[in-house]
Image (cartoon, rainbow, N blue to C red):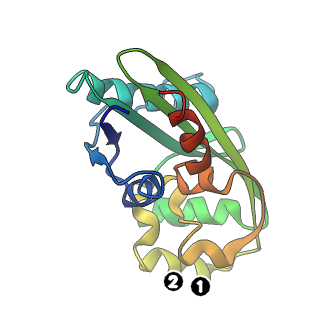
Amino acid sequence: MKKIILASQSPRRKELLAHITSDFEVQPADIDETVTPGITPEVYVTQMAEQKAAHIFNQYPDHLVIGCDTVVVMDGEILGKPVDKEDAKAMLQRYSNRTHDVLTGLTLMSKDKQITKLAQASVTFYPLDDDQINDYVASEEPMDKAGAYGIQGGASIFIKEIEGDYYAIVGFPVGLVNELLKSF
């Protein structure tokens, strides 16, 4: 198999890819993630995954590059990483006692082949009070995460129900990646 490069700075993605192989490098992709008006969340997140993979692949054309992007979708609106603590609080308040979707776009790109897939899940939160939200935001944990929460961390206590791929919520659908790597 070709040398793998993970086009991400996410420590969670790095940790999950290490369950599949230890033989990979990490090269964060610096791309413009501005949402084009009118684009669907599914198209946006898969385009971002493709662009991240392509950005790194152009520098390392003899490698297999994995690009990912994750967004939360609430009421049809794409929610990325919060811009500040108030934004994080507003996102968390919206999830209280409601269901939202989490989408992760995934692209594997090599000289010979490119595969792009979408992994998704629906997440229902318990009702949240202001103290819970304020305490969680004060922990700084939500600040680098799409949708302002990490399901595998402190926000785990907010989760009432999950339907779909848990690892899509974490941001790296590891089972899907493992299956797709078999074809490279």
Tag of residue 11: none
Discs 2, 1 touching: Cβ within 8 Å = yes
Foreground pick, 130 / 5: 5
Q: Quadrant of residue 29?
A: top left
The local secondary structure at tag 2 comes to helix
Rendered position, 18 above or below 129: above
Asked whether, in this view, residue 159 is left or right of residue 143, the answer is: right
Q: Mark 1 highlights which residue?
A: 131
Q: Secondary structure at mark 1?
A: helix
Give the quadrant of residue 116. Answer: top right
Which residue is found at the position 52% from the left and 49% from the top? 172
> Relative to 164, is 12 above or below?
below
Residue 62, horizontal then vertical, whole percent: 25, 23
Structural distance between the alpha carbons of marks 2 and 1: 6 Å
Mark 1 residue crowding within 10 angstroms, few (<14) / some (14–19) / many (20+): few
Name, please, the residue furthest toward the front: 1
Residue 97's x, y, as percent? 79, 67
At 40% across and 14% down in the image, what residue appears? 112
Residue 114 x/y as whole percent: 47, 20
Q: How many marks?
A: 2
Could you tell me residue 41's position as x and y percent?
61, 32
Which amino acid, mark 1? Answer: Asp
The foreground one among 146 and 181 is 181
In the picture provided, is 55 more to the left or to the right than 90? left
Judge whether residue 130 can be spotted in this image.
Answer: yes
Q: Is residue 71 left or right of residue 159?
A: left
> At x 44% / y 26%, what residue is drawn?
50
Taking depth in this image into account, of 1 and 4 the one nearest to the observer is 1
Query: Which residue is denoted by mark 2 in the rendering?
Result: 135
Q: Residues within 10 Å of mark 2 (few under 14, many from 20)?
A: few
Q: What amino acid type is highlighted by mark number 2?
A: Asp
